[in-house]
Amino acid sequence: MRIVVALGGNALLRRGELPDADVQTANIDRVATAIAALAIDHEVVLTHGNGPQIGLLAGESATDPALSAPYPLDLLGAQTQGMIGSLLLRVLYDTLPGHRIAALVTHTLVRVGDPAFLRPTKFVGRTYSREAAGRLARKHGWRVAEDTTGWRRVVASPAPDRVVETDTIHELLSGGTLVICAGGGGVPVVADPDTGALTGVEAVVDKDLTAALLAEDLKADFLLVLTDVPHVYAEYGTPRQHPLHDATPTTLRHGRFAAGSMGPKTEAAARFVERTGGLAAIGSLDAAYEMLHGRAGTLVRPDLPVVG
């Protein structure tokens, strides 16, 4: 079976943890255990988030007196791909001896006119109090919004059109390589309509939507979206909150999930299942193997055809 795994950024940095390198290195063992259980018998493409990491680098860049201007988000995204890809590759080499593993910096095409550039919704970086977030917004020209635990920076998150390196990923995968790619949704780029030249843009592409697109293009059988909750919860945050064990694209789209958290995950799963007829699941990292076998998480199946 061919599986695309979308790993949440909080797999390396859990909520509230310091963004130190040794903290992320310690957390990576959980990832290796979960992914190795899948990779022993299946073809695996591993994508990952970068929200905490790119937010940290952006904050450092904005306050570095040696710079005349902060680094743009596309280059910071490439940096996080290299860092997280290296951490994942090293630990997976130890956990899966004899496996071919490659960490690939990848680029994702987006549209210049995507309305998301006018309505930033993607959370990056750490959580602040409302007052601190306001001060940083005024100082650095950031947009900020309220998350579930406080206030964070938000940036544009245009829809992914295509992963530039898809053919390369396909060749590596077909040759028996576990591929780590599309980190942080891929480096966002636009293509010149005449020459095809690529230019980076100030944005962060949603990694779950990129994973769904990549899974479709790679003809994957299963999309596995791993996060820090065991299920998708219907009516989240209300007295009627309850876990969804089974769902379809239609039921997920009726769920009205938050755009900055569960919304992109449910939309990614819905798109993949609709477009391919394959299966998807959303749930916690530690239950990845059980999710693949329908024993944990929220399993997303195709809608039943309408008869009559």
Image (tube, rainbow, N blue to C red):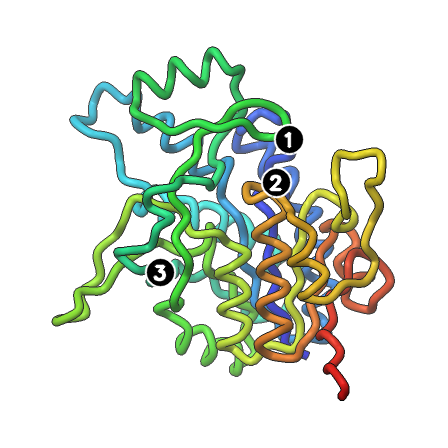
What residue does disc 3 label?
Answer: 107
Name the mark on residue 59: none
Q: Note whether residue 89 is visible.
A: no
Query: Which of these two is toward me, 157 or 173?
Result: 157
Count of marks, rendered view: 3
Q: Distance between the residues labelled 2 and 1?
A: 7 Å
Indicate left or right for 8 with 72 as reference.
Answer: right
The answer to whether 175 is drawn above or below residue 69 in the figure is: below
The answer to whether 283 is drawn above or below residue 270 in the figure is: above
Check the picture and name the quadrant holding the N terminus: bottom right
| Mark 2: secondary structure | helix
Quarter of the image where one finds residue 68: top left
Q: What residue type is labelled 3?
A: His
Q: Where is residue 90 in the image (x, y as percent from the top left)?
A: 55, 53
Q: How far apart are marks 3 and 1 (CA)?
A: 27 Å
* Mark nearer the N terminus (3 vs 2): 2
* Mark nearer the N terminus (2 vs 1): 2
* Mark nearer the N terminus (3 vs 1): 1
Residue at left 73%, top 82%? Answer: 305
Q: Position of residue 63 (x, y in %)?
A: 30, 20
The answer to whether 82 is drawn above or below residue 288 in the figure is: above
Q: Position of residue 208 (x, y in %)?
A: 55, 56
Q: Where is residue 102 in the image (x, y as percent from the top left)?
A: 48, 65
Check the picture and name the quadrant holding the C terminus: bottom right
Quarter of the image where one finds residue 71: top left
Q: Note whether residue 198 is visible.
A: yes
What residue does disc 2 label?
Answer: 10
What residue does disc 1 label?
Answer: 15
Please identify the residue farthest to the front as the structure is shown: 308
Residue at left 64%, top 31%? Answer: 15
Residue at left 51%, top 35%? Answer: 52
Residues packed near mark 3 inside 10 Å, few (<14), some (14 to 19) or many (20 plus): many
